[in-house]
Amino acid sequence: MDLHFDPAIAAQVAFQLASTRNELGPDRELAHELEATFSASAGEEATQAYRQLLILGDRHHDAQAFQEFLIYSTWQQAAEDPMAEHFHRGRELCSRFLARAETAGAVKSLAQVRALRASFLSALGEKEADEIGDEYDRDAIKGGD
């Protein structure tokens, strides 16, 4: 899948927005420390910081920009270490984000998150549900227009 944006830059923008909105409340400083470690290091140190960021994300499900940051960060993890675990987590984070964002009326990053979700699904060998395509197939089988 060809992404038309840079997930690393999108992650920085989403993290800045989460910080500006103070989405994490008292966990804000810890998030900054972990993000700095994640961004500046590699290997096990970055992986540990990433896992701690995911734990913060579990505590703050309603922190929309931070959840978006986690999606982009998971993409970075999957690109660096292409393990099924990262792709499964990315799919889950995207699905959760899209379900909440669509009900909340958020529009800004939906296309990017959808693109990443399709990428995670593709890496797992799964097909994106395509309601329009499925409807077309059902009509074509029945001889509809």
Image: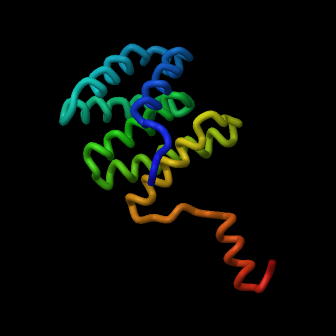
Question: Residue 36: percent from the left, percent from the top?
Answer: 31, 20
At x 45% / y 64%, what residue is drawn?
126
Question: Residue 19: percent from the left, percent from the top?
Answer: 49, 17
* Coloring basis for residues: rainbow
Q: How many marks?
A: 0
Quarter occupied by the N terminus = bottom left
At x 32% / y 46%, what residue is drawn?
78
Most distant residue in the left direction: 44
Judge left or right: residue 82 versus residue 143: left
Most distant residue in the right direction: 145
Quarter occupied by the C terminus = bottom right
At x 63% / y 39%, what residue is drawn?
101
Task: Please tell me whether residue 103 is drawn above or below residue 60 in the rendered image.
Answer: below
Judge left or right: residue 141 versus residue 96: right
Q: Nearer the viewer, residue 12 or 66?
A: 12
At x 71% / y 71%, what residue is drawn?
135
Task: Please tell me whether residue 42 is drawn above or below residue 25 in the rendered image.
Answer: below
Judge left or right: residue 138 versus residue 32: right
Question: Residue 89: percent from the left, percent from the top?
Answer: 40, 48
Judge left or right: residue 20 versus residue 78: right
Question: Residue 121: percent from the left, percent from the top?
Answer: 45, 58
Task: Please tell me whether residue 124 is drawn above or below residue 12 in the rendered image.
Answer: below
Q: Nearer the viewer, residue 89 or 127?
A: 127
Q: Nearer the viewer, residue 21 or 76?
A: 76
